[in-house]
Image (tube, rainbow, N blue to C red):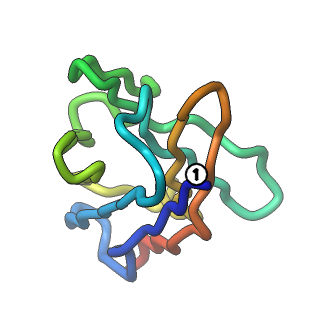
Amino acid sequence: QVQVVESGGGLVQPGGSLRLSCAASGSIASINYMGWYRQAPEKEREFVARVTLSGSTDYVDSVKGRFTISRDNAKNTISLQMNSLKPEDTAVYLCYALYRSNIYWGQGTQVTVSS
């Protein structure tokens, strides 16, 4: 079993920054992928970013150049640095870990961008 726990999030003004963190724990040696999805009210869950064990990254087009995902393999943690935030970034951000073909989700953390 893998547990995934997010931290960070909160309320920020447009143009501001936030940093999300996510830790995976349990009986694991390494995790293939870790990343983030987000879900806004009345919208489908959307892929945001991911990082592989080797450090390769992918982003949804709407966050490229503004968000940066990073990973600490020794600690099985990832971070998402979010800059130049926009109101449309408002959502619940969910961390996931892909391990042995199973996806494990965190409980989510709210990010609200509003003046």
Callout 1, which amino acid? Arg
Q: Going 51% across and 43% down the picture, which residue do you hit? A: 97
Q: Going 39% across and 26% down the picture, which residue do you hit? A: 59
Q: Residues within 10 Å of mark 1 (few under 14, many from 20)?
A: many
Query: Which is nearer the eye, 32 or 115?
Result: 32
- Residue 38, how many percent across, how many down? 58, 51
Q: Which of the 4 image quarters holds residue 24?
A: bottom left
Q: Which residue is mark 1?
A: 38
User: Seen in the image, is 55 located left or right of residue 105?
Assistant: left
Position of residue 72 relative to residue 3, above or below, is above
Q: Going 28% across and 53% down the picture, which residue do you hit? A: 77
Q: Which of the 4 image quarters holds residue 105?
A: bottom right
Position of residue 76 relative to residue 41, above or below, is above
**Which quarter shows the C terminus?**
bottom left
Query: Which is nearer the eye, 42 or 39?
Result: 39
- Residue 80, how many percent across, how many down? 28, 51
Position of residue 88 relative to residue 14, above or below, is above
Number of labels in the image equals 1
Position of residue 83 relative to residue 33, above or below, is below
Q: Going 39% across and 81% down the picture, which residue do you hit? A: 10
Q: Secondary structure at mark 1?
A: strand
- Residue 64, how many percent across, how many down? 30, 28
